[in-house]
């Protein structure tokens, strides 16, 4: 074996060892940085809700988000059905002040089994992360990371105790999150489906499927349209007086 080949192999082994030595917290932070949302986001969603008997209902929503280094604002607005048109859910965060304003994380989104906490992004400061045994999902190697609430207040404001985060090894994209109750029983599962690269080549899921193993309900959130541009965020949209639901 030539010296150059040995050198390349040593570098590869070193990089691989470094990757395998990553802590759960480090992997989560790297994933958040790599898949960070753009500063301005507009999306059109379809929500398909199904009960345990297979009966379903549809809702369409618009989503606006604006972020910078210190603050983030998110707004969901129902378009249909007509009797719910204009209903909103809004979440504001200010990193400097350490404040969050909006509905409780355990609040269901427009009557679905998706909670506000499921959609406002991973709040890494609220959890302790640890590595578990790696796993292949659909033949794709994944890191498995356990997320435990840092204090009891996190448990009280959510519908679960701890989580298992399944993160692809090749690009740190989170494919699935399993939620467990205080007795270690599976309560819910969120799957990120049909990921596609955006204009910057960053993978974004185009469908989210939440399954509740306690009552049999399912919610599919499908992204029908996604635009990363401030031009699609109307002036004053985050000043709506009905933005706090």
Image (cartoon, rainbow, N blue to C red):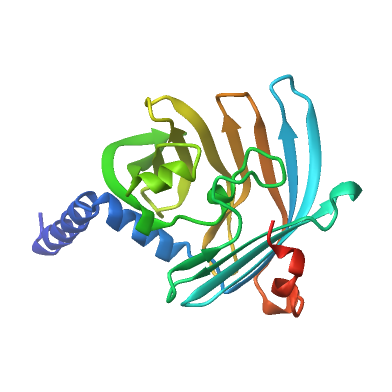
Residue at the (74%, 39%) spot, across then down: 48
> Is residue 167 visible from the viewing direction of this image?
no
Please identify the quadrant where the C terminus is shown: bottom right
Residue at the (67%, 63%) spot, across then down: 75
Q: How far from the left and from the top, in percent, is residue 28?
A: 36, 55
Q: How far from the left and from the top, in percent, is residue 96?
A: 42, 76
| Quarter residue 230 falls in | bottom right
Q: How far from the left and from the top, in percent, is residue 235?
A: 75, 80
Of residues 124 and 171, the one nearer the viewer is 124
> Is 210 on the left or on the right of 76, as rendered?
left
Q: How far from the left and from the top, in percent, is residue 118?
A: 54, 48
Q: As drawn, which residue projects farthest toward the top?
A: 53
> Is 106 on the left or on the right of 229, as rendered?
left
> Is residue 112 visible from the viewing direction of this image?
yes
Residue at the (16%, 56%) spot, across then down: 9
User: Number of labelled discs?
Assistant: 0
Residue at the (29%, 54%) spot, across then down: 25
Above or below, comparing residue 233 to residue 21 in the picture:
below
Of residues 21 and 2, the one nearer the viewer is 21
Q: As drawn, which residue projects farthest toward the right?
A: 82
> Is 215 on the left or on the right of 154, as rendered?
right
Above or below, comparing residue 66 to residue 2 in the picture:
below
Of residues 13 and 204, the one nearer the viewer is 204
Above or below, comparing residue 206 to residue 237 in the picture:
above
Please identify the quadrant where the N terminus is shown: bottom left
């Amino acid at each position: 074996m030539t010296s150059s080949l040995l050198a390349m192999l040593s570098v590869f082994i070193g990089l691989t060892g470094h990757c395998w030595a990553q802590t759960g917290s480090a992997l989560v932070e790297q994933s958040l940085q790599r898949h960070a949302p753009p500063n301005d986001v507009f999306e059109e969603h379809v929500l398909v809700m199904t009960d345990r008997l297979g009966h379903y209902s549809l809702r369409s929503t618009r989503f606006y988000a604006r972020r910078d280094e210190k603050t983030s604002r998110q707004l969901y607005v129902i378009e249909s059905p007509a009797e719910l048109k204009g209903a909103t859910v809004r979440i504001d965060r200010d990193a400097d002040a350490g404040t969050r304003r909006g509905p409780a994380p355990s609040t269901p989104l427009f009557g679905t089994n998706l909670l506000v906490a499921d959609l406002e992004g991973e709040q890494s400061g609220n959890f302790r992360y640890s590595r578990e045994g790696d796993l292949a999902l659909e033949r794709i190697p994944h890191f498995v990371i356990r997320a435990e609430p840092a204090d009891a207040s996190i448990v009280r404001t959510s519908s679960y105790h701890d989580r298992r985060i399944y993160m692809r090894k090749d690009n740190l994209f989170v494919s699935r999150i399993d939620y467990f109750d205080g007795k270690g029983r599976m309560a819910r599962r969120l799957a990120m489906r049909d990921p596609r690269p955006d204009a910057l080549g960053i993978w974004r899921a185009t469908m989210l499927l939440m399954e509740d193993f306690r009552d049999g309900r399912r919610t599919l959130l499908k992204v029908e349209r996604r635009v990363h541009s401030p031009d699609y965020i109307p002036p004053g949209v985050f000043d709506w007086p009905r933005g706090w639901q």
